[in-house]
Image (cartoon, grey):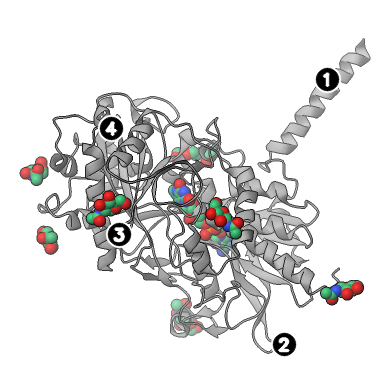
Amino acid sequence: MGSSRWWRKMATGLSALLLCLRFCFGRGGFPFIHQSTAAPMVSYYDYIIVGGGTAGCPLAATLSQTYSVLVLERGGSPFRNPNITHLSRFGAALSDLSPKSPSQRFVSEDGVINARARVLGGGTSLNAGFYTRAGSPYIAKAGWDAKLVNESYRWVEKVVAFQPPLRQWQSAVRNSLLEIGIRPYNGYTLDHLYGTKVGGTIFDGYGRRHTSAHLLRYANPSGITVFLHAPVQKILFTTEGKPRPTADGVIFTDASGLNHWAYLRRGPNSEVIVCSGALGSPQLLMLSGLGPKRHLQAHNISVVLDQPLVGQGMSDNPMNAVFVPSPRPVEVSLIQVVGITHNGSYIEGASGENFGTDQTQSTRDFGMFSPKIGQFSTLPPKQRTQKALDRAIQAMRFLPRSAFVGGFILEKIMGPLSRGHLQLRTKNPNDNPAVTFNYFKDRGDLERCVQGIKMIEKVIESRSFSRFRYNYLPISSLLNMTANAPVNMLPKHANASRSLEQFCRDTVMTIWHYHGGCHVGKVVDRDYKVIGVDALRVIDGSTFDYSPGTNPQATVMMLGRYMGVKMLRERYAKNETYS
Ligand SMILES: Cc1cc2nc3c(=O)[nH]c(=O)nc-3n(C[C@H](O)[C@H](O)[C@H](O)COP(=O)(O)OP(=O)(O)OC[C@H]3O[C@@H](n4cnc5c(N)ncnc54)[C@H](O)[C@@H]3O)c2cc1C
Ligand SMILES: *[C@@H]1O[C@H](CO)[C@@H](O)[C@H](O)[C@H]1NC(C)=O
Ligand SMILES: *[C@@H]1O[C@H](CO)[C@@H](O)[C@H](O)[C@H]1NC(C)=O
Ligand SMILES: *[C@@H]1O[C@H](CO)[C@@H](O)[C@H](O)[C@H]1NC(C)=O
Ligand SMILES: *[C@@H]1O[C@H](CO)[C@@H](O)[C@H](O)[C@H]1NC(C)=O
Ligand SMILES: *[C@@H]1O[C@H](CO)[C@@H](O)[C@H](O)[C@H]1NC(C)=O
Ligand SMILES: *[C@@H]1O[C@H](CO)[C@@H](O)[C@H](O)[C@H]1NC(C)=O
Ligand SMILES: *[C@@H]1O[C@H](CO)[C@@H](O)[C@H](O)[C@H]1NC(C)=O
């Protein structure tokens, strides 16, 4: 009797311990994820991946099948953080401005408030979840092997892609897109096709987020080590006995401020692979001595390679949106439906009054368009100061509940064509670099935006959407202001509601699809190898000069898997013996 109770206690204790091992340390069941303070001072690997983000995780999981792989991620774990794991908390991480936040806010030189990931899983741990592939022409132009691309997408989708439940408001958006002629209807599909469709999402039926870090379940546990809170300071190069600079390791810092050295194992195929994202990758190359010589010298960085194109070609797809107050309740939804037009804009929608934890006044919110997360279109970009932002957040507290009932119809333009650049501000890799996107500098972008706004007007005026708008509010007043809400509209220029061009410029926001800085053909070659040095690649959104599909995350994850498989195949083909 006593002993059986003892056993039961032991068994309960043991299973609690096992559960805890799985979740308490935020490892999501992955025993190979550790805090950087546990890292050895010096260690050796076949591959060192800088950044456990959208591309870094699938790449690491793949290479670990055969080789020893180290992943160094500057942020923490996504697995036990409710701000990350649940759809209803979208916005919580983005509005958390503490140094520990999984999201690091930055403001581009253009004046648009933006965010970058600082967490395992990268952008997939923060984003709105919409999952959709790149179109076939995009894949052909990139020179990718279409068969392997499809296999890689499927590999990713098995773990992270789900069909969203389509409710009333999103259905109305879908019907009105069809009504205004964005046809055919392609139903639920992950493919990028002209017409109207329902896309995938990385949130499952319970609203739980599945990130690129979940792809680590494919990893070979004995081939992979992941360190969290491990910002890489610089990539190390050797020239000894080499024809040109060759990457041979990195220096990273642990959470207590101590430096650690990770080196590549000897052998012709070991590599450092930078997957630090569109801001992080060009920044880290520069900090490591690869970049425009004069700029590096101005920061006292010793030049490894004068490469003027590092940090060039930064782009962010501008997003403009119109809030449409609704006379009836609407569901909480992030993007589910998209209209893919022939004139360079994509029309999407998001609805719902609240993405907070409870229903109290103070957490009432505009979700993807809340000033709390930095979305702030009631003032033109350069006037979006912290003070003005704080005022908008305050004002939101005094709005009646009815002001939050409704949804946003947004348009994002493809491309874009406009390009900017990135420069270091400091030598600290934790600091944001200075980035300029030059929204609408190219007239083509402005024209696409104007077309997009015209389509939005048509959607709002469509019969299919009529249940979700007040009849007495004409478009001109919608564009001008809405129920005093601190969301879009109220443009500063008096001519804005008459000139859609001015409206586009005044109300521009980001949809966080920024990319570039290490373009293919400029900084890396078609195999993503950094031009001019050896044993170094960049694989992530910084290599894109055009954003893939309507939304990039599917293609960034695909690329991580795709390149991992390609690298393994190349090494098998060489028939080398390893160990
Ligand atoms: C709020 C938000 C909403 C979005 N919504 C969608 C959406 O609905 N659908 C969609 O398809 N896309 C969406 N996106 C875009 C998409 O998530 C990103 O384009 C994509 O995740 C970028 O992937 P990446 O690998 O290039 O960079 P990231 O995923 O950002 O990966 C870079 C990683 O490197 C780490 N890192 C950087 N520097 C260092 C260093 N020095 N040392 C160590 N680690 C470092 C970072 O912490 C990060 O984890 C959204 C993005 C955001 C932010
Ligand atoms: C979640 O976000 C809120 C507000 O954005 C913040 O106060 C809180 O500390 C965050 N929680 C975690 C676990 O990061
Ligand atoms: C890849 O998949 C797309 C649809 O998702 C299809 O149109 C295309 O033909 C496929 N390509 C190959 C080479 O299988
Ligand atoms: C670069 O080094 C010089 C001399 O050591 C110093 O005077 C200067 O302030 C440094 N500049 C920067 C940007 O660190
Ligand atoms: C934009 O594209 C849509 C459908 O793709 C079409 O109905 C509309 O007429 C186009 N607008 C212009 C101005 O070409
Ligand atoms: C926009 O709103 C302002 C202030 O509320 C008003 O003065 C102006 O006439 C409005 N413009 C249009 C075009 O409705
Ligand atoms: C609108 O007004 C602003 C200044 O108030 C001006 O700079 C801009 O050129 C005007 N735009 C148009 C299209 O007239
Ligand atoms: C690979 O190596 C094996 C023996 O190690 C050899 O028999 C085979 O011919 C090699 N294949 C190629 C393609 O070199």
Question: Does residue 338 show up?
Answer: yes
The amino acid at mark 2 is: Glu
Q: Which residue is situated farthest in the front direction here?
A: 184
Looking at the image, residue 224 sits to the left or right of residue 540; the answer is: right
Residue 9's disc is: 1
Tell me: residue 505, above or below residue 472: below
Sequence-first tag of 2 and 3: 3
The amino acid at mark 1 is: Lys
Q: CA distance from mark 3 to mark 4?
A: 36 Å
Q: Nearer the viewer, mark 1 or mark 4?
A: 4
Q: Secondary structure at mark 2?
A: loop
Q: CA distance from mark 1 to mark 4?
A: 60 Å
Does the CB distance between marks 3 and 4 fall below 8 Å? no
Q: CA distance from mark 2 to mark 3?
A: 45 Å
Where residue 320 sits in the image (x, y, percent)? Answer: 29, 50
Where residue 460 sits in the image (x, y, percent)? Answer: 24, 38
Residue located beneath label 3 in the image:
111
Does the CB distance between marks 2 and 3 fall below 8 Å? no
> Quick one: quadrant of the N terminus?
top right
Graded by Cα atoms within 10 Å as few (under 14), some (14 to 19) or many (20 or more), the crowding at tag 1 reads few
Ligand 8, image quadrant it occupies = bottom right
Residue located beneath label 4 in the image:
464
Tell me: residue 425, above or below residue 155: below
The amino acid at mark 3 is: Gly
Q: Nearer the viewer, mark 1 or mark 2?
A: 2
Residue located beneath label 2 in the image:
240
